[in-house]
Amino acid sequence: MQGVNRARGEPGLESGCHYDALDKMAVELDVFVGNTTIMDEEVYQLWLDGHTVNDAVKVRMEGGVLEECEASADVLMSDTMDQYRTFQMCERLLHSPTKLANQLLFQIPPHRQAILIERYYAFDDVFVREVLGKKLSKGTKKDLDDVSAKTGVTLKSCRRQFDNFKRVFKVVEELKGRLVENIRQHFLLSDKLSRDYAAIVFFANNRFETGKRKLMFLTFQDFAFCGGQLINNWTVGAVDNMVEDMDVDLDKEFLQELKELKILIADKDLLDQHKSLVCTALRGKTKAFNEMEANFKNLSRGLVNIAAKLTNTKDVRDFFIDLVEKFIEPCRSDRWTAADMRLYLTHYTNSAHILDTFKHQLVWDRYMGVIKSCIFKMYHD
Amino acid sequence: MPGKLKAKIVAGRHLPVMDRASDLTDAFVEVKFGNTTFKTDVCPKSLNPQWNSEWFKFEVDDEDLQDEPLQITVLDHDTYSANDAIGKVYIDIDPLLCNEAASVISGWFPIYDTIHGIRGEINVLVKVELFNDLNRFRQSSCGVKFFCTTAIPRCYRVAMVHGFVEELVVNEDPEYQWIDRIRTPRASNEARQRLISLMSGELQRKIGLKVLEMGGNAVVGYLQCFDLEGESGLVVRAIGTGCTLDKVSFGSAPNTNTHVHPSTAPASNACNSPSKDGKEPVFAEDLPSFSGPPTPFRVLPTSSSSPPPFSPSKPCSRQSSSSDTDLSLTPKTGMGSAGKEAGPLKTLLRQQTQTALEQRQEFPFFTLTSFPPGFLVHVGGVVSARSVKLLDRIHNPDEPETRDAWWEEIRQEIKSHAKALGCHAVVGYSERTSICEEVCILSASGTAAILNPRYMREGCLDTGNTEPRFDEPSPPSCGFCHIPYDELNMPFPAQLTYCYGCRRQKVPDVLFTTIDMPSEAAVTGKGCLIQARLCRLKKKAQGEVNATAISNLLPFMEYELHTQLMNKLKLRSMNALFGLHIQISVGENMLLGLASATGVYLTALPAPGGVQIAGKTPGDMSNEHHILTIQKRINDTIAKNKELYQINPPELTEEVVGSPIPEPRQRSRLFRSHSESSDELSELDLSHGKKDAFVLEIDDTDAVEDIHSLLTDASPPSGFYSCNTEIMPGIFNWTSGVQMFTSVRVFRLSNANLTNQGLNKIFTDLCENLLKSFYFKLRSMIPCCLCHLNFTVAVPEEELIQVAVTAVAMTFDKEQILEKPGDKIITKGCIEGEEQLQFSMELCADSSGISTQQLSKISGVPESTNVSPRAASVDYGSFADRCSTWLELIRLKAHTIRRGSIKTSRRTQSLAHSVSSLERSSPLPEGRSRSLRSNRSFGGSSVTVVKMTPLSFLPGTRIIKYLGIINMFFIRETTSLREEGGVSGFLHTFIAEVFAMVRAHVAALGGNAVVSYSMKECMLMENPNKNQAQCLINVSGDAVICVIETDQEPIHTAVGPRQTCSSGADGTT
């Protein structure tokens, strides 16, 4: 039948099957165009989620919208098709959200525009967890069907989300200024979403390993928070805010300086002194004191070694896995509580200042500040 | 050389990538007017070029200024090959030629390409310097204002209505020229767009000249149409109403859209002092203050009304099946008490107006659909004429006589129909065509009416109230319902009653019109959209045979459409139709008929009876049972509808009037209980035995089907109302939510062996489903009303049915709705309408098809018009008044006239109401209305929000300036249909683009809204096998600036005072 043939070729409308229902009524053409573009948020979400028209109609029917409005399945089908078409026509504009505001084709009230953009750029945490830290390359994109199968997010939606990451990455890559701010300005996203994107870009750029089994307990929000800490404290932008890539790359000089911290574990006296200071402060304040005392040297070596190795790109990638292996896992096996962790790290950081022979206070603070908040965030089940 | 046109190209943005290698574009612009072309520099390698050109100056005749569009072409410079066109912008500079409209055009225009659609935008500045031209023989008509609005534009007052203007120009269609075989589709499309733009300009100029000749300065209700006649050419024609308009100054009249006289007095006295002129609408000065002491005429005893000057010239023979009794024998029983004023005054009025009209012009037609209060004196009913013609090549475009003659013929006929109804004018007049191959159906329709002569005569304005004799013979609220014809000599059999509003004059029991409901009319409950839909198969044929076949089918279609309308009206318990539009479209193998109107219960007309089912074989018991079941369903439907539309007049009427109105026995078994009374007059007997519209006979399965289909019309879901008039009768408190939309559906008939019944079902479902879709899509706007639902049907190809709808959804405040019924009653209310029944004779005469002469005699059309060069021109004309084809039972009721206090107060209230009703049409508490301006720019962008509506106003706002007419024609073509999302994707994009271009033009004129928007043409041709499609769209409207109404304005305080004064008025009357 003609209708079906035509449908096959329609880009975006994934399969011709949605036409079958219309074929029965032999509706050859069916459009509805409002002067103010009408968009149903529910349908938009279904579209974003990559549902076919038929699936979307099913979902809507189950949602009871029909009974609400005394409509029939045909009406729902027609409406869904219309909306899907509208969204496809808008999609081009959503790729550069600033255009959406001054294009003339669709008259969309500003608050709706904001919703459209925000939703379009929203992503599924399960999905982003899968690609976080991966290179945003064609290769990764090819593997999206696996990701789709694993996460239950439709392939279409996976592609959209992936393309969003890539698009944002490409645009902000070469811009000067604050990463979050650039994202917000170029993509008109909310503050929260801009920060999430900043983290995604940052992870992709530094290729942090997040996919190992040991890291599986960490959510995207954990990583996003840590990413934010790194961006704010360890990048070039943290000290100089007019450099290209300033928020995307770690501050090389700082990484170099981190090597100096090795003295904390290399110098035996210093290590002992540090330990006794910490133990004195902790004694009697926690049930895990014995384990802390026993593990102090191991833990301290772990943290300082991570710092010292960060000049190697490979070790940067393993930053999170190292944190987990060298610090979080030992503590967890000793059953530290979150409060224990806080107590320990606070005293561990502060005590270093009292060590007379330790000269690298600034680097230490810059390092430990981030480590502390990352570990706090990551220390959960 | 009376004009200098200046254009400046500022910048472009979002241009498409034209150079794949660099992903950039080297754009430059050509600016062309007439034969002069300027170019900008090339702005290399940019998708957002800044040209900032000098001012390009064109020194031209104002004639050219009117005809030609400014043509801006954006191109990509290519050193080695030909420059590639990116797209074009046509700018109609007409708005700049009128000093009251826009002064500069400045803004971003979408760059449009007929193949690729919108490709970026260009920022342009255009100005015109006009020099005074004292040449008396000039060919231009600069300065004449044009309005699509079919009412007196808000913010103007009418000094005089001159009347009908029409013109048509013809040309060869570039698409059919030999050169089209060798040029690209793009070139062909552009040639066509440009030609039509030129022709529209020329047409407008010529019409402007006619208006100037008449002494007018504006054309209101300007309706321009294209007839794409294919091989035989391209016709652009327009009709309108010439007027002299005065601008209302704003300082003094803040709420202009309410037509308030500049010297507006404080709102509070608006209502209680009826004689206060300052309070009255702009037109008030032309009006007598109707609440004043009764004029002598009112009390004139008139037993013998002299026959109207134009008593029906044709015999009204009715031979339609159901009318056994000749109604022309209508008893005169009612006369003694009723006919009083009807006679002399009416005649006088008629004569006066007629003279005024006839002095002025040949056709006393008005394209307006709503009028200043007092303008319409009486309404007679719908008059229409159709004619089937065979198209022939237009040999000499400069002398389009044939087409002129065709229309002339039809207009003559309309005029004679109006005369037959005792009317001297036709209002709500429109013309349209339907073309299929070489056959063309020309149709015209309007509403016969008697107008107040005051508006027709020069100088009358100044005299103001010095002519009290012409006070309306009755309160204006119901005056328009009173019959204009003489009841002793009725043009068709009809049953009359005394007006339920004034109790003094006669009204028909059903009234059909093509106009909007007069704002002063009183309605009971709400109105609703009523549609009659019909398909008729016809054999494929050629030439004259085809034309004959079509003209033979037409009468039957009209008859059926009317029957359907009437039945549906009864089912809804309503008694009047407004905004009636009947469209008959012709295809190769079928005819489609669609009649749309807004049904209401006019308080002034009698309550409609029920619908009764009668079996052909009464003896059959099972059949009897079946009939009872159907009857029950019908009765249930009526009861349900009464509730739905809040129609509960019988009780009310009885209380008020004190005399129950009898229902004719034969068809009101169900309702008899409460309405039977001894007041019944002998007229009952008359209606007896005539079982046409009200009594549905079930004699075969088709009839059963028909009845079922009547009952299947779904009512709108709760929270929704719908109408095809400007606003919904019975809803006043509009809020600012407005959503204009266009929807198109094409249905493919898959089954080749369809019957008429099957087709009807499909067509009905198609329309019903469309409506359901609208309700669903717009559900977030509840409570809301779909206004001005304008359906257009076409048969683009064999087996395809296309329905296009443009309408606006408007929100209203539900809470206030409860208050309003009071107001509704206030509105003045009686109506006279009438039914014209002249079906029979034409029916049979017409069946002879080509025997046009004979027909024309019957209908009074001059024979000469039928002596067309080709005998093939089949005149279907005499079928003309479809109104008259309606058969119907009419009851005549009489009641004692009591002037209860309630009733009087009602009338006085109505006075107050008339002042405010206009205001009310768009009153909006500021709080609820979102500022238009606030939306002006968002996201830091400079895009102006432009609202669009098919109505003449935007609720909650006040139009402060009309910037000029928007009349645009676009062609879009694709050779990659699949890639663009199929035919739906293609059309969806195109319609969105058309909207965008309209908005951009309005914004560039400095406007923020389009009113009276309409899509006149949407012609889609597809060839999926070749992956191609082409579509033509023509839209029009008035660009305006409107501002949010503020609370300080009197309107909003009106509700309270109004009520107070109504009670005060009680005493006075």
Image (cartoon, coloured by chain):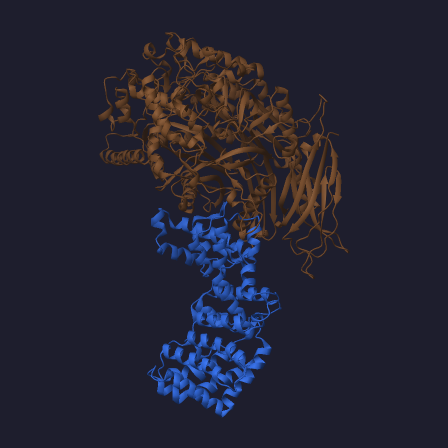
Question: B32 or A258: which is nearer to us?
Answer: A258
Give how far across and how far down residue B969 sits, in percent.
60, 39
The answer to whether any part of residue B438 appears in the image is no
Q: Image height check: is B514 above or below A97? A: above
| Residue A176 as seen in the image, left or right of residue A361 | right
Taking the spot 48% from the left edge, 81% from the top edge, the residue there is A353
Question: B32 or B1024: which is nearer to us?
Answer: B32
Q: Image height check: is B844 above or below B935? A: above
Give how far across and how far down residue B714 sits, in percent.
36, 40
Report the number of discs: 0
Q: Colour of chain A?
A: blue
Question: B629 or B72: which is nearer to us?
Answer: B72
Q: Colour of chain B?
A: brown
Taking the spot 43% from the left edge, 47% from the top edge, the residue there is B777
| Residue B410 as seen in the image, left or right of residue B107 | left
The answer to whether any part of residue A59 appears in the image is yes
Quarter of the image with the N terminus of chain B is top right
Q: Image height check: is A94 above or below B337? A: below
